[in-house]
């Protein structure tokens, strides 16, 4: 039986904290790109983004499995696709230098923000519906 959403508040708060941290990491890399920082620094910052995402995605997927979220599999596929794209960016960076990160800007501005605002919100809504269903309002 899935846990009630009210019991998930600490985990949901942790996910939101991770989202804020992830946005900071992504912005650090975007700032370094704008400033024309050396490829080695960019590779380090991109590695931090990838590592942060791996940890974040793991947490999300564990929570989704524990909650019985029916969209876990497609959500996991989105995570895998994102990590694949970022690893490709890392490979392009090592081959082409900073120009290899041109598509990173679009990836961060579109994919991540859309994913957090739409896809992750679906999970939150699922938990809130579970809570309402478990504790219907009195007539």
Image (cartoon, helix red, strand yellow):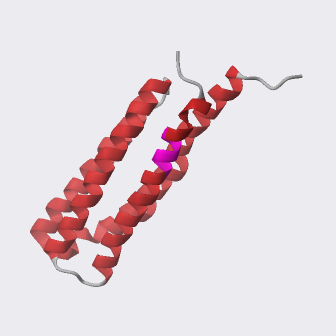
- Report which quarter residue 90 is drawn in: bottom left
Residue 121 vs residue 84, the one in the foreground: 121
Residue at 48%, 23% in the rendered image = 68
Q: On the rendered structure, is 104 left or right of 93? A: right
Find residue 49 and report its horizontal and vertical position in percent. 29, 59
Queried whether the magenta region covers residue 106, the answer comes back as no
**Residue 106 visible in the displayed image:** no
Find residue 101 and report its horizontal and vertical position in percent. 25, 69
- Report which quarter residue 43 is drawn in: bottom left
**Residue 101 visible in the displayed image:** yes
Q: On the rendered structure, is 120 left or right of 29? A: right
Q: Is residue 111 above or below residue 95?
A: above
- Report which quarter residue 6 is drawn in: top right
Magenta residues: mostly which secondary structure?
helix
Residue at 36%, 36% in the rendered image = 76
Residue at 69%, 23% in the rendered image = 133
Residue 76 vs residue 61, the one in the foreground: 61
Q: On the rendered structure, is 6 left or right of 112? A: right
Q: Residue furthest right?
A: 139
Find residue 94 and report its horizontal and vertical position in percent. 11, 66
Task: Give the residues drawn in magenta, as a range.
Answer: 11-16
Q: How many numbered discs?
A: 0
């Amino acid at each position: 039986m899935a846990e009630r959403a009210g019991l998930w508040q600490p985990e949901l708060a942790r996910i939101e904290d991770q989202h804020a941290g992830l946005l900071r990491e992504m912005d650090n890399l975007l700032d370094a790109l704008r400033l024309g920082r050396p490829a080695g620094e960019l590779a380090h910052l991109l590695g931090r983004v990838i590592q942060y995402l791996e940890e974040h995605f793991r947490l999300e997927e564990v929570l989704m499995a524990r909650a019985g979220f029916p969209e876990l599999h497609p959500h996991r596929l989105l995570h895998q696709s994102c990590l694949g794209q970022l690893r490709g960016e890392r490979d392009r960076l090592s081959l082409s230098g900073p120009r290899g990160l041109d598509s990173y800007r679009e990836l961060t501005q579109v994919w991540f923000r859309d994913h957090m605002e739409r896809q992750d919100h679906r999970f939150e809504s699922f938990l809130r519906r579970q809570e309402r269903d478990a504790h219907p309002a009195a007539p």
